[in-house]
Image: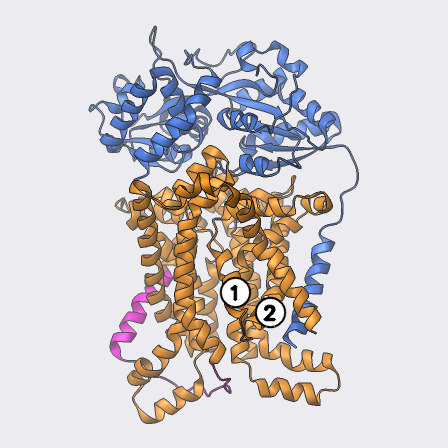
Amino acid sequence: MHAKIASLTAWLGLFLLLSGCAPRPQSPEVVVYTSVDQVFSEPVLKEFEKSSGVRVLAVYDVEAAKTTGLVNRLLAEKKRPAADVFWSGEIAQTLLLKEQGVLARYVSPSASTLPEHYRDKEGCWTAFGGRVRVFLVNTKLLSKERYPTSIEDLRKKDYPADKIALASPLFGTTATHAAALYAALGEEEGRAYYRDLQARGLRIVDGNSTVRDLVASGQVWFGLVDTDDAAVALKRGDPVAIVFPDQEKGGLGALSIPNTVALVKGSPHPTEGKRLVDFLLSRSVEERLRDEGWLYRSTRGANDNVVEVVTMKTSPGQVFEMLKISRSDMTRLFLR
Amino acid sequence: MKAFSRIGEAVYLLVVAGPVLMLALTSLPRAPELWELAFPRGQSLNLLSNSLVLATAVALSDLVCGTLIAVFLWRRSGRLGGGLRLLVLLTAPLPPYIHALAWIFAFDTVNFRALTGLVGAWWVEVMAYLPLSTCLALLALEMVQPDLLEAGKLLAPDQRVLTRILGPLATPFAAAGAGLIFLLCLLEYGVPSIFGAATYPLEIYAEFSSSGDPARVFFMALPLFAAAALVLLATFAGYRGSALNRAWSRPGVDLPFHWPAWLRWAQGAALLLLAAQVIVPVATILTLTKSLAMLGQVLAFSTAETRVSFQVSLLASLLSLSLGAVVAHRLRQPGPMQALWWAVVVLPLALPASLVGAGLIDLWNRPSMLALQRTWAMPVLAATARFAPVATLVILVQLSRTDPRLLEAAAILAPSRIRAWVGVRIPLLLPGLLASAGLVFILTAGELATTLMVVPPGGSTLVLKVYNYLHYGSTETVAALCLLLTLATLLPGAVVVRLVRRRK
């Protein structure tokens, strides 16, 4: 008789379940998975909806999922994709998706004005803009002449290790930064660099936003973050300053991580997907994202209000090649 | 009726065990290449031992604290009892990650920054799971036959009743509760990550993030799976025996107990901890929310997420409840399949959430199921896959408390089956049904990793929104969203507590 109770509840549950499953009215729509912060990406997608009449259905990634969210969802859905477009806040995950055959070839007309190295040779992704890895310094705790100027400063004893914060290099842009340093310095030198950082005992924290908040609250003197994290602190009026590392002549340069946009292979709405890709790669969107603080610099046109930055010369392909090696090292060094 | 039961069991296998089976089926052919991942060595072994130590410490601490609080609440009725039960529920829906941020904020405010590493993770997880452990301990105490306690009170002082009757009889159920807490902690990666504690799930997530290969992650997760299964099967062994062999009992008279001084002191300390685990997150949230206007604003732009979170949690509760009732009934039937059913119920509890998400997509992303893919049915199925086993175990406890003679009498005397069912069975099972529904509701409301894998495009839940704003550093919005989450979960919680009290 317990089964009776169960079955009645099951019918009730099924009814409620199905009542929430009514198909949506047919209208042109596009599905986008994005790891760009919702506060920045949502207004852009709304603008596309308004201008194109195509309804945008977005899924936003969260930092706390440790970059296992949307990329793994795309991989799992590979046989029957639900998404049309992948818009990433960085490049490493996009290259992984390309390697796994998740992305379709599409050369957007909007990409014609972008530099060649921002376009995948096989047309599977296009990059634009850039978030830069920078030092965020607490201006109350460090005078200007003591600001760090190079990533080498992270291993110098001039700064106490517990007064420097770094996001876990196992995930996100900090992991990409590690791979870029491996590519730029060479595998051995890159490994030695991170071994030194680990031996020093820097304060390794959960994510870039935590680094930002630790610097802003004065618990550490400085830390490495992305420019969008730094922009939030500046906007809040926190006592912080941004320093671009390695800007001297002939220096290594700061790592600039572009956004990437790609069409998903076998997507359900390829036509609408292409329209969204074209829109996202337009100059106006890039400039808007720069003005709002998500991007530090625009790839095209003038960057009047920003400091010109010397960036690292590593290509996305070189970074991706190093990613697996560096990630394995980072796990060994920092997860112990 | 048998047909209905078989259908229910089949649906349970499909929804709850299905994702595990799909992962196993796709991963096992690669065993020759990947089997080494299932045997962690060196650093990985250290990480695994860290995880086991942390989960054990949290489970034991919560077992002690939760039991002390539960003993205090157990025979306490009236406004104080109801109010305290509600207080226990207050912070239950907040994910452990939010608890961690609240504690860090609180300690930073008083310049106490020593809470790092495994100790920090232990403290926050003990606090975050204290509501759940208290509820489970209360259930354990409710399971003890009142006749035995009454008889004991006639023959011996209360302290001996406590140590000789109440303790031994409640222990199997309390141990099962500790097993569940152990499992939740074992799979938790967010809190250790915040405190810089190196644990095995973080290595798994690093691998998943790096390779995106579920098969590799499946093999890496096997040691966790094995550890969790061992602990659960060991802790539930006592529960299993007690639940299956226990004779029914009539409701007892609420005789007052006079506990020894040492127990009252210990209860006082545990109640202080309970107060701290409520005050710190709530005060932090209220401080950061700053004004009611902010709450109003957040409510205005989060109406859809609030509604959806509520619906998903409610539907997952109902589905878990109905499937749990069928399988709990099945678990009571002795026979060769009983052990297998126990494994089916217990093992899905031991899978990392992202893997469940990958398994769900593997299982449901088929041409015939495309209509399902774009709907909120997927998060409901995801939550059911993760939490229906919890509902099953709670309902099993309730079933073993039900007087079979009343059920038989109802079956014979009631004019119709429906009358017997509505008039007798549901009222008799109601506390267990409500408790299991409430637990699933709370756990679903705070679920992140699996939901992210299957949330329909264009939609979001409150928890997803919280994490989105968390990264942006909008603390006021995050605090207001957390307050909203608490209220949205507390209201049904209050209804459950009220109904249970009225039923009693």
B141 or B391, which lies in front? B391
Q: Residue furthest right?
A: A26
The chain letter of the blue chain reads A
Q: Is residue B263 magenta?
A: yes
**Label 2 element class:** helix
Q: Residue furthest front?
A: B32
Residue B370, position in %: x, y?
71, 44
Q: Quadrant of residue A261?
A: top right
Residue, disc 2 = B325
Label annotation for residue A232: none
Instruction: Please report contact status of discs 2 and 1: CB closer than 8 Å, yes or no.
Output: no
- The mark that comes first in sequence, 2 or 1, is 2
Task: Look at the image and give the residue range highlighted in magenta.
Answer: B246-275
Q: Is residue A328 above or below residue B396?
A: above
Instruction: Identify the residue at horizontal 39%, vertical 66% (top origin).
Output: B234
Q: Residue furthest left?
A: A157
Q: Quadrant of residue B36?
A: top left
Three-letter amino acid code of the residue under disc 1: Leu
Left of A115 or right of it: where is A202? Answer: left
Chain B color in figure = orange
Residue, disc 1 = B340
Left of B113 or right of it: where is B494? Answer: right
- Callout 1 crowding tier (Cα within 10 Å): few <14, some 14–19, many ≥20: few
